[in-house]
Image (spheres, rainbow, N blue to C red):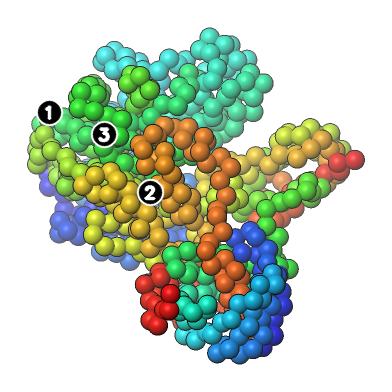
Amino acid sequence: MGRVRKILIANRGEIAVRIIRTCRAMGIPSVAVYSEADADAPHVRLADAAVAIGPAPARESYLAIEKLLAAADASGADAIHPGYGFLAENARFAAAVRDRGLTFIGPPPEAIAAMGDKVAARTLMERAGVPVVPATPVLAPEPAAFAAAAERLGFPVVIKAAAGGGGKGMRIVRRTEDLAEAVAAAAREATAAFGDGRIYLERYLERPRHVEVQVFADTHGAVVHLGERECSIQRRHQKIVEESPSPAVDASLRTAMTDAGIQAAAAVAYVGAGTIEFLLDPEGRFYFLEMNTRLQVEHPVTEWITGLDLVREQILVAGGAPLSFDAVATRGHAIECRLYSEDPARGFLPATGAVRVLGEPSGAWVRFDSGVAVGSRIGVDYDPLLAKLSTYGATREEARLRMLAALRETVFLGVVTNRDYLAAVVAHPAFAAGATHTEFLAEHFSDWTPPAGPDHALAGALAALALAGPAARRDGAPDAAAAPSPWESLGAWRPGAAR
Amino acid sequence: MSVRRTIVVDGRPHVVEAHGRDDALTARVDGAPLALAIVRDGATWRVRVGGRTVAATIIRDRDAVWIALDGAVYHCVAGDDARLGVAGGARSPRVTAPMPGKVLAVRVEVGQRVGAGDPLVVLEAMKMETIVSAEDEASVQEVHVAAGATIEPGQVLVVLDFG
């Protein structure tokens, strides 16, 4: 291991863009990889070099280990950053990278494997003195086995993928009669998402908060924490709003949770950036959920309050350097919202289309991490994450109000997004009060419908006029004339306004 | 110019009429009058309405129109093509795909009886599964898709008989 000289990013979308930006700031050449669906994607344009790795389906491109290794060889990269998702928590990939004489910018494969098997990880954590939620070992995917286990643990229960993460393959079950379909679906989803269909059962805690601890370790034995993040705002176990610090964590709880996080990382001889997820119950008891052995989607909120660039630290640690910091002082508060191409008005169905106009928010203490640009086609092959918007403030309320203003500036035309849903969540009095838990959306937003905009009737009239003209291009592709700056539609331009 | 048609704005249908030229238009939305003056510059329209002037960004995508106006985004669909823009009402014998994606599994056969909530077809898009279920007790009349098929939103999956 030595200093990293050229990095291949084995990922796509906003995280590939974000990693390439740090490479540029460090003066390290970057290599993008792309599937046929992503030939014109922003991460390809931004990187110093780009290698085509196959057809759109991830299995044949972003998950194809041999193709990625060949791309590294062909481009002369000596290190691979896996981002999050895809192969980021695949121990076989990390080992293959190492065996090829390349640097894997992440933890050792042994640590990934130890935490990747969620059942083995629980046992390991119990032994290390970290509190865990009652659960079964891996069960055969038969309704009878699950029914018997559920009786023992007590309903509600949650079916989880042993190789899981990010909510894939997860199903909450409240009645015995619903177990059969849920077991089958969870096993199929786990197989599709991770290539590993093993599932198990866990007691489901009602209304806990999701609080996670960011840890960082180097190859010289140092393990530190970078505070906690709260990610309780989840829909179908997918986080959509995250923040740091957690409004529920005071100094003594923070000490207890970060100590447990460091213990957990040390137990697997961890190296690099990692996250220990806990469920925090209303009484202030916390339970180990899992460890994510990679950079998290929501890492920007930690970057805001610590002033660190976590990707830079990952690259330095992977090159063998000691941590450039020890105990980090945090300040202020940061909130992140995930913008997805999905339709809240229609049950959050995935929305496809082409981005025809993109208004990116900016200004003081506003950060927009985007993986798309005008012209990007949003297909069905990948996660629907379009961009992450994060804001910072001296206080939580300041960050929250800044988020609402920035969401208003965020305009996507051509693809339906969850923007207005996010704004409604951040504006909700319970969110403003910090009264968040993992059932928050189910409790406050289960029958939410988008409110009619103030200029609803005017929009209808303008649409009728637009449709009365000759049809524009029928392929739905962006045309140059139809891609103006959307700033003008943000409400600031109002000469001669008489109100 | 003279226009009269149904426009579904974010799922809500409106009858829109408009007469005149861009610099002096009279529109009616569900009967309520709206006096407009418009200067078009590509996708940016400067619109004078009710004593204020706003700039709207307007993009047409076949029979749909996207409008960004004063921080709000409106998705408008022409009435005749509004099927996808309006939330479903009464139970329909033709069970359609709510989203684009792939058919993972077909759970029913022609002639089979199903109960309310029974799974008919399992779809997958963007790595998440969605189960399309029967809205009510019915018998399966036709099955139009097989596992592995790629589907478009609105495509008929199964036809039921609620009788």
Q: What separation in Å lies between label 2 and label 3 (alpha carbons)?
A: 17 Å
Asked whether, in this view, residue A311 is left or right of residue A380, the answer is left
Alpha-carbon neighbours of circle 3 within 10 Å: few (<14), some, or many (≥20)?
many
Q: Which circle, 1 or 3, is nearer the viewer?
A: 3
Does label 1 or label 3 sit earlier along the sequence? 1
Does label 2 or label 1 sit earlier along the sequence? 1
Q: Is residue A407 above or below residue B45?
A: above
Amino acid carrying mark 1 in the image:
Gly
Amino acid carrying mark 2 in the image:
Cys
**For the point 60% across and 69% down, which residue is it?**
A457
- The kind of secondary structure element at disc 1 is loop
| Residue A367 x %, y % | 28, 56
In which quadrant of the rendered view does residue A459 lie? bottom right
Alpha-carbon neighbours of circle 2 within 10 Å: few (<14), some, or many (≥20)?
many
**For the point 20% across and 27% down, which residue is it?**
A251
Seen from this angle, which residue lies furthest front?
A: A499
Camera-side residue of A488 and B113: A488
- Label annotation for residue A228: 3
Residue B62 seen from this side: no
| Residue A220 x %, y % | 10, 31
Q: Are marks 1 and 3 on the same chain?
A: yes
- The kind of secondary structure element at disc 2 is strand
Question: Would you say the residues marked 2 and 3 are in contact, meaning their CB atoms lie under 8 Å apart?
Answer: no
In which quadrant of the rendered view does residue A409 lie? bottom left
Chain that bears disc 3? A
Q: Which circle, 2 or 1, is nearer the viewer?
A: 2
Amino acid carrying mark 3 in the image:
Glu
- Label annotation for residue A221: 1
